[in-house]
Amino acid sequence: MIGESSGSDNERAMIVRLVEDPLDTMLTVSELVDRLVTCGVLPNRDVATEHVLHVLRRYKLEESERYPSLTLANLSILDAMDYSDNEDIADDARIALAISPECALAWFVLVEEPSISPTEKRARYERTLRAYERLIDVNSLHEDILSCDDRQYLRARTGLALCQWDEGRKSEAVSTLWETLRLNPPDYNGVRGILAGWLPQLDDDAQLGRLVREWPVSVEDPDPKRTYTETLLYFRLGDYAAARAALAKAYQQNPHVLDAIVNNDEPDDDGPPAVAASSVPYAESVNSYIGAGWRQTAGAAAWALRWLQERSAR
């Protein structure tokens, strides 16, 4: 649980109280105010009452009615997120969690707190996923059109895998991404690209081969990430003729990727931009995914550089 990790004593105690609260209870304004004050997220009843009434009026809800705590929590954090320069968004997330500990969006916000430890970050991702799994049908994520909650859930799964990898829990991280792919074959978050960078670092050619085999191929819109990954797989397996043929195809799709790999360019972690797959920005994105796997495969980058030099000499 998040309350067991290494935050401050006050923060741990507050989150423990939140987790022990009843789930999705019906609350009046007075009960909601009591909850906010009891959890310590707002200093007194006057401030808490002002906050509650603001949210109710913002969304045109009657002050005399009872409302599900999870609904109120979601409205509270959504109201806070409307202010793009809100520097207190973590405090607003805690207010939402005081209203309902199952507010998935609030947990997702708290994941981004800069001061938390890697262990705490992973625990918050796990808590985020549990909350989203109460809201969505995880078996419907194969659809091309996803809801906002669906997309946030998939981002949280990817975030959890990245935390696991950074903590050295690499097998867990890979398993998390394979399960994410199973749930979402269209690959909303670019999980295949992450695996393409990780699996060579683990010297796991069996899983790398599975990744390439199961990676959809588009004749109209080929993905250089897949083709450069296929090239690396053939090189690692010692099938150099197939590797050269695949590299020629990959280079035709985007020559800038090879430049980034052989020149050991610093990866850009911004993810795939909405630009043409043959462009320099897209190449930088591809390098951020798969470049480490290439560079940690002995001889791969040097072999690719020789291929490039031979090609230029023709």
Image (tube, rainbow, N blue to C red):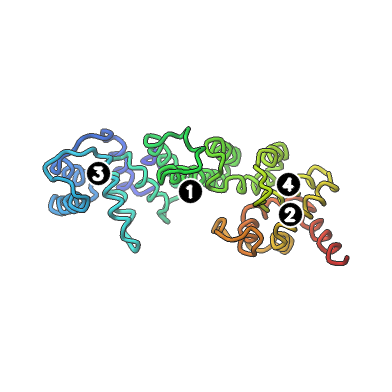
Tag 4: residue type?
Glu
Asked if the residue under mark 3 is in contact with the one under mark 4, i.e. CB atoms within 8 Å, the reply is no
The residue carrying mark 4 is 230
Classed neighbour count for the residue bearing mark 3: other residues with Cα under 10 Å, few (<14), some (14–19), many (≥20): many
Q: Nearer the viewer, mark 4 or mark 2?
A: 2
The residue carrying mark 1 is 118
From the viewer's side, name the closer residue of 276 and 247: 276
Classed neighbour count for the residue bearing mark 4: other residues with Cα under 10 Å, few (<14), some (14–19), many (≥20): many
First along the sequence among labels 3 and 1: 3
First along the sequence among labels 4 and 3: 3
Q: Which mark is residue 18?
A: none
Marks 1/2: CA–CA distance? 36 Å
First along the sequence among labels 3 and 2: 3
Q: Secondary structure at mark 1?
A: helix
Query: Is 174 displayed left or right of 127 in the figure?
Result: right
Residue reaching furthest to the left: 64
Asked if the residue under mark 2 is in contact with the one under mark 4, i.e. CB atoms within 8 Å, the reply is yes
Marks 4/2: CA–CA distance? 9 Å
First along the sequence among labels 4 and 2: 4
First along the sequence among labels 1 and 4: 1
Marks 3/1: CA–CA distance? 30 Å
Name the residue at 14% across, 40% down.
65
Name the residue at 13% across, 43% down.
30
Query: Is 157 displayed left or right of 245 in the figure?
Result: left
Please tell me how many numbered marks the rendered image carries.
4
Q: Which mark is residue 72?
A: 3
The residue carrying mark 2 is 250
Tag 2: residue type?
Ala
Asked if the residue under mark 2 is in contact with the one under mark 1, i.e. CB atoms within 8 Å, the reply is no
Q: Position of residue 110 (x, y in %)?
A: 38, 50
- The quadrant in which the C terminus is found is bottom right
Q: Position of residue 290 (x, y in %)?
A: 66, 52
